Image (tube, rainbow, N blue to C red):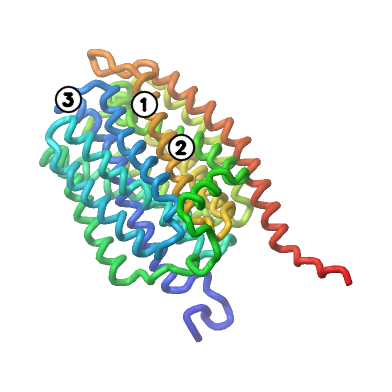
Amino acid sequence: MNDQTIGSKPKLFTRYQLFVIALLAILQFTLVLDFMVLSPLGPILLDELNIATTQFGWVVSAYAFSAGASGLLTAGFADKFDRKKLLLFFYCGFTLGTLLCALANTYHFLLMARIVTGIFGGVIGSISFAIITDLFKMEVRGRVMGFVQMAFASSQVLGLPIGLYLANQFGWHAPFFMIVGLCVVVGVSIVMYLKPITAHLQLRGDHNAFVHLGRTVSNPVYLKTFAATTLLATGGFMLMPFGSTFGVHNLGISLDQLPLLYVITGVCSMIAGPLVGKYSDAIGKYRVFVIGSLVAIIMVTIYCNLGITPLWIIIVLNVILFIGISSRMISASALMTAIPDAKDRGAFMSINSSVQQISGGIASVVAGLIVVQTSSGYLDRYDLLGYVVDGAMLITIFMMYIIDVQVKAKAKTQATPAQPAAA
């Protein structure tokens, strides 16, 4: 009996692959928490820093814009280094940026800290996805993405309630110090246990980084994926920054009730994530994406038009909404990993991540312009924001269909053996 089999039944993953999945999931947890913690801190930051919703939108967008720029600048070099070393370098920078957030005491200091965090943090997700593509077959990537994307739910179950508690007890800086501590543990694990990932270095590619970047950006098939990613990010980036403020001032949720809302929603999303990944492998990634999108559209429309609402109804709607959004992200991420050729994975993932970050940053700014906070704290025009998100989701369904067709055509070509030359 070896690490691959138990009796005659093959194991789906080796022990090392399970370790990589767990490591990337925890790493993604710190990245997501660093971004998501800003949303529940919104009401506190708006008051303590005496800033407007537009300025808060820029705090959220600063990370996205700097992450996008960083991803584009490093894309040409992404396939020229050991992915472990690349991951460690950018994760150390991300940890430093988060520490600066913890030390910030003014709006401009916080804005600068978010820029630093984004410069390093924006590249990490693309490196992680490249690692997943290198180490796992397409047939199981839905499952892998399901577990790794559990980071979003885990950040709600564990990170946000603890972060909110620390913020209420010790000030809004405390959650960032907590994230720095987690980052140190993850960084040590990467150094000690993650093996070098260098197989892509044996493949023939462009020696010049800028030529490599140019060819990746100009590839027609890749461009279709980047276009879909542009709208894919809209939903989360538009709704998330003002989600907690909307809940407190429009729906009537108290700050003490927010942790309960996040915990219950997160637990349900954690349970749903691996199931979504499993079914996306079984019945088709695009089919799961469509189902998740339709669910999300219905829930966004209902949620954004609510007034003062009982907590249990808000919890139910949030659970369904987040399951829909998770279904979209897990299935879309797994499907997109099949698009790039092996020699282009790092560059493709970096550019795709940059496109997502930049479009998300624009979405956050637009959200800040659409939503207006009145003197009482009430957010006006949140229903309009919901309709904009719905429109983006509908368009993305058709764009992801084009990507699905491309993936199937590529798989068919690779499965067809080359014809022998005529005598």
Which of 48 and 336 lies nearest the eye of the viewer?
336
In the image, residue 383 above or below residue 413: above
SS state under label 2? loop
Residue at screen point 36% across, 33% down:
240
Q: Earlier in the sequence, mark 1 or mark 2?
A: 2
Which of 90 and 257 lies nearest the eye of the viewer?
90
Could you tell me the amino acid type at mark 1?
Answer: Val
In the image, residue 346 above or below residue 423: above
Which residue of the protein is positioned furthest toward the top in this rendering? 375
The residue labelled by disc 1 is 365
SS state under label 3? helix
Which residue of the protein is positioned furthest toward the bottom in this rendering? 1
Task: Give how far apart the Cα atoms at labels 3 and 2 are.
Answer: 28 Å
The residue labelled by disc 3 is 47
Mark 3 vs mark 2: in front: 2
Could you tell me the amino acid type at mark 2?
Answer: Ala
Q: Position of residue 76 (x, y in %)?
A: 45, 52
The residue labelled by disc 2 is 233
